[in-house]
Amino acid sequence: MNRHFEMRKLTKKDIREFDDLLAYAFQVTTKVLGQAGWSKDEMRRSKKPIFDSSYVLGWFYKDQLASQIVIYPMEMNIHGRICAVGGITGVATYPEYTGQGLVHSLMRECIRHMKESGETLGVLCPYSIPFYRTMGWELISDKMQYIIRDNQLPKKVPVPGMAERVDVEHEDIREIYRQHALIHHGALVRGEREWEEYWRWDSDDIKAAVYYTQEEEPAGFVIYELEEEVLRIKEMVYLSQEAKHGLWNYISAHYSMVNFVKGYHYDGETIAFELPDSEITETITPNIMGRIVDVCGFVNQYPFQNSTEERTLYLRVEDGMADWNNGLFRLDFYGSSCRCEPAESTGGEPVIRMDIRTLTTMMMGYKRPFYLWRNERIEADDILISQLEKRIPHQKPQFSDYF
C-alpha cells in the first residue's frame, strides 16, 4: 500500500471530516437535510454523542480521511439473554480510494476490537449483501412490508381496554418497548442514543397511540403517519393478544380516512394469515446481517434448548478474517449450556464443517441446520444435523431498528 496511507482511530478533531465523508458517500445534501428540517451544524451536533461513544477507525491519505468504519456499542436479546454486540455503521470510502482493500482491512481490525471488548457478535444494515459476505457476514433477519386496502382491514374485536393517542416521546412507549425487547429474540435494547436514532429522520407529522388495559396498564403502541389517504405504520409493538387486537381496532377506525394501510414488521412471519381477507400485498426484504466475532465466546454464553442428554460435538469453522475462529472446536453440551474450546483433534469422532457465515445465521435462528445442510452449507452426517436441530432454539430474530 502507498506509504502515505495511515490507519488510526478518529478523535474529536476529526468529526468534521467524518461527517463530510458520510454526507458524500450517502449523498446527504443540504437539500436532503433541509427536507428533514436539519442544518449541517445541527446534524453534526446530533451525531456527536454517537461519535464520542463509538469506536471510529479510519484510513488517512496524506492526513486526509479516505475511508472509515464505526463500531456502535449496543445490547441485543439473543434467545432471552441480553448480550453486548457491536453495530457496524458509517462504512464509507471516497471513490478515488476504492479498490485498495481499505474497508477489508478496517473490518479486520474492527472484528479484533469487538472481540477484545467482549462483543461476540456484530450486526449491520448492509448496503451490499455480496460485499459483506466476502468478509464473513450473513443475513440474520428480514423486513416485511405489507399493504392493506381499506376494505381489507380487520373487523373490530371487542377488548376491555382502549387505545389513546399520546405524544411520541411518551414514557409508556419506551416502557412497552423495554418489556418487548426483554422477551423477543433479536430485539435491540434501546437506550437514550438508540431512541434518538429511532426518531432521527421522522417528520413532525409522526403520531403515536398506546393501548391501555382495563387496569390502565400500557400494553402496546403503534407509531404511524397519515398522509394523502395512506396510514403508514412505522412500528407496532404489543405485549399481549388483547393489545394487538386493540391496536388493530384503532387502525381500522381510520378506514373512512385512508385508502391503504402500509407498514413493516420484523418477526419473520407474514401477517396475511391473521387477516380475514388474506389477499394483501406482502414483500419480504433482507434486513440485517450478522457475524460471530468470537466463536467460543459466543457459544459459551448462548442459551441452547435444554436437554438432559450430555453430548460432545466437534465443529470445524472457516473464517478468513479472524484467525481465532478458524479451526476445530470441541462443544460439550449439558443442560442448556455448552462449553466451547479449541481442539487439536477429534480422536476419530465425526466433524461438523461450516464457515463463519453459516454458523452465524444458524445460531441466530434465521436458517435451520437441516435447511443449511440440505443446501450444502454444512458438511456433516444426518445424525449430527439432528443433534443441532435439537439444540438450537427456533425463534427468528426480530430486529426493527436502523442505525
Image: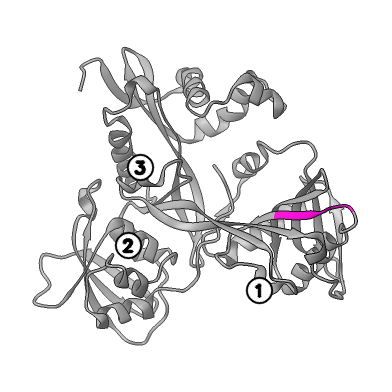
x and y, in percent, of residue 206 in the image: 77, 43
Report crowding for label 3: few under 14, some 14 to 19, many 20 or more residues within 10 A (C-alpha): few
Tell me how far mark 2 sits from mark 1, CA to CA: 31 Å
Q: How far apart are marks 3 and 1 (CA)?
A: 35 Å
Choose between 273 and 41: the one closer to the eye.
Answer: 273
Residue pictured at 27% horizontal, 67% vertical: 376
Q: Mark 1 points at which residue?
A: 273
Q: Tell me which amino acid carries mark 3.
A: Phe
Q: Residue furthest right?
A: 256
Q: Can residue 219 be seen in this view?
A: yes
**As drawn, is 360 to the left or to the right of 211?**
left
Secondary-structure class at tag 1 = helix
Residue tagged 2: 359
Q: Which segment is the magenta one?
A: 257-262
**Residue shown at 57% from the left, 65% from the top:** 184
Residue 196 image position (x, y, % from top left): 65, 39
Residue 207 x/y as whole percent: 80, 47
Image quadrant containing the N terminus: top left
- First of labels 2, 1 by sequence position: 1
- Which residue of the protein is positioned furthest toward the bottom in this rendering? 308
Classify mark 2: helix, strand or loop: helix
Q: Can residue 217 be seen in this view?
A: no
> How far separated are the C-alphas under marks 3 and 2?
18 Å
Identify the element where label 3 is drawn.
helix
Residue 36 colored magenta?
Answer: no
Q: Name the amino acid, label 2.
A: Leu
